[in-house]
Image (cartoon, rainbow, N blue to C red):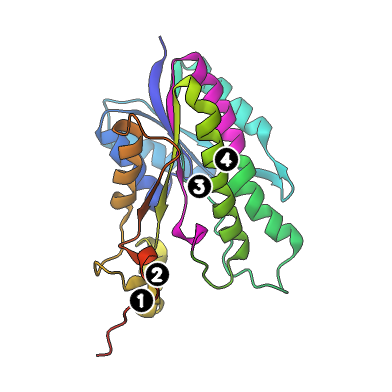
Amino acid sequence: MNKKAVLITGACINTGVAIVEKFASEGYNVIFTGRNSEKVHAKENEYRKKFPSITVIGYHIDSLTDERTVDEESVNKMFADIDRRGLFVETLVLNAADQGLGQKIFEISLADFMKVLNTNIVWNYCLSEYAAKRMKDNGGGNIVFVNSNTAYRAIPDRIAYEASKGGQLGMMRGLALDLGKYNIRVNAVLPGMIKTDRWEKNPEFYAKVPSRYTPIGDVAVGEDIADAVYYFAAHARNTTGAELVVDGGNTIQLYPIIPQN
């Protein structure tokens, strides 16, 4: 019997790190990916030292070979190596994303637009398909998308990202429907603003950005997103095709209430 594991994409920085540490602290064997081989190696050593009782494996993997082509061969090789190691990805957490930052209409190329959609939708479908084949053969599993509240609420200069997150939710529901008969659950966590390294590097911008003014008066940290992901993976036995928004209530308000003093 293969050892069960969680596979988390984009897990060398920010929210991905928090998700790894949540699952590792709960005793899961952890497989993770990153785009930079040196960072993957460094985080692999760090995670192993922090969680010596579990198996930790990092893979350097890119989503695309070019803006139009998903790197399916890398996905195939990664899952073949996971199989060879006697591990079974019972939980897939799709956290990595092309943020599509600063893509102004009339200025970005069609290739740049396609790159975001291909990474956030097509590549995630590829990963889901490879994982789901193994889940089907092993009695079930679950897939969790780390999506975004921008799937419903637009922000400036992020059209490709917003389109990809909206499309990703449609894909999540389709996967949930088609995979349910194999005991595979598929759900999505929708964060709003998160206090990542961008927050720390640009405090003047984030001190004034409207989305920091949430109804509960606080912005999420990575651990908040990790808790929501873990809920779907470990506790939501009868839940599939669902969305859990983690944004301090930003999505429910028509506009942020910004203090005048």
Q: Amino acid at mark 4?
A: Asn
Q: Quadrant of residue 232?
A: top left
User: Mark 4 or mark 1: which comes first in sequence?
Assistant: 4
Mark 1 in CB contact with mark 3 (< 8 angstroms)? no
Q: CA distance from mark 1 to mark 3?
A: 28 Å
Mark 2 Cα within 10 Å, few/some/many (few <14, many 20+)?
Answer: few
User: Mark 4 or mark 2: which comes first in sequence?
Assistant: 4
Judged left or right of residue 110, residue 63 is: left
- Name the residue carrying label 3: 96
Mark 2 in CB contact with mark 3 (< 8 angstroms)? no
- Find numbered disc 1 in the image and state the secondary structure of the residue it sits on: loop
Camera-side mark, 4 or 3: 4
Q: CA distance from mark 4 to mark 3?
A: 9 Å
Q: Amino acid at mark 2?
A: Lys
Could you tell me which residue is drawn at 61 percent across and 45 percent down? 121
Please provide the residue range marked out in magenta: 125-152
* Position of residue 110 measured from the top left corner of the image (x, y, whole percent): 75, 61
Asked if residue 132 is among those painted magenta in the image, a careful observer would answer yes
Marker disc for residue 256: 1
Is residue 72 shown above or below 149? above
Marker disc for residue 124: 4
Q: Quadrant of residue 64?
A: top right
